[in-house]
Image: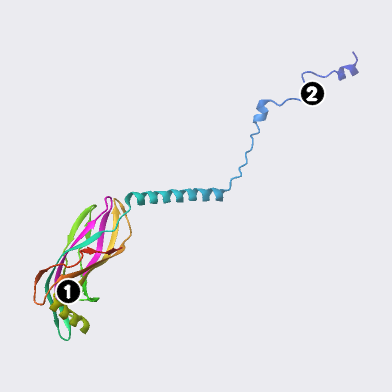
Amino acid sequence: MSDYDQQKIPNEGAGVGYPQKPSPLQSSNHPKKYYSDRNPVKTLCTVLLTLLILAGLLVLIGYLVYRPNEPNFSLAGAAIYELNVTTPPYMSTIMQFTVLARNPNRRVRLDYDQLSALVYYKSQPITPPMMQPPLVQKTKSTVILSPVLRGASLPVSVEVANGLLMDEFYGVVALRLVFVGKMRYRAGIIKTKHYDIYVKCDMMVGYKKGFSGQVPLLSSPDCPVDV
């Protein structure tokens, strides 16, 4: 065989002239690249929206479970120890009231702060506001409030002075007992903000000039509550 023929015979070991198949090891040296089309801002917004929805659901569930109701107030008794009118005119007053305050909630207690009481006659205050001690009312409970209210020589209008003299003559006097202050609901460690509370007890009492002591109530004992 000539040297020319030997050059035409392919070398089987070298694989000259044939495409070589890459080995698995060679393929693994080039890791695949994965590209994500997620927007980080969009993802953050989704997470925040999910958290807000969960927080709203928790608040709704808590409200449906506890759902605090307003307290109930009712007038149980009244006593007048002094109710006099003097010139030019002035009015002097000593009164005591018995009021029942009921908490209708099963899971929520009531905290009263800065609660004060005063008495009105013909839309004019005849006693200064009297601050009441702080009150913590447990669930499904009733407490008795017995404020003693005094007014010494408070100036009043001529209409108020003449109206009282006329009512005492007929033996029926219309009064309004008012409680004003702050209140909040508390369930375990959870407590609400302070709410303004306004309680109005309108009453008709049997009273004549010179009498001192317990007076009969001639009207409904219910006291509307505004929170």
User: Which residue occupies the extreme top position in the image?
Assistant: 1
* Residue at left offset 43%, top offset 48%: 54
Q: Which residues are magenta?
A: 93-117
Spot occupied by residue 178 in the image (x, y as percentages of width and height): 23, 69
Relative depth, front residue between 115 and 7: 115
Q: Quadrant of the N terminus?
A: top right
Image quarter of the C terminus: bottom left
Residue lying at 79% horizontally and 23% vertically, measured from the top left: 18
Q: Characterize the magenta stretch by its predominant secondary structure.
A: strand
| Amino acid at dot 2 | Tyr
Q: Which residue is most to the bottom?
A: 88
Q: Is residue 19 magenta?
A: no
Secondary structure of residue under mark 1: strand
In the visual, does 81 lie left or right of 175? left
Residue underneath mark 2: 18
The residue labelled by disc 1 is: 173
Q: Earlier in the sequence, mark 2 or mark 1?
A: 2
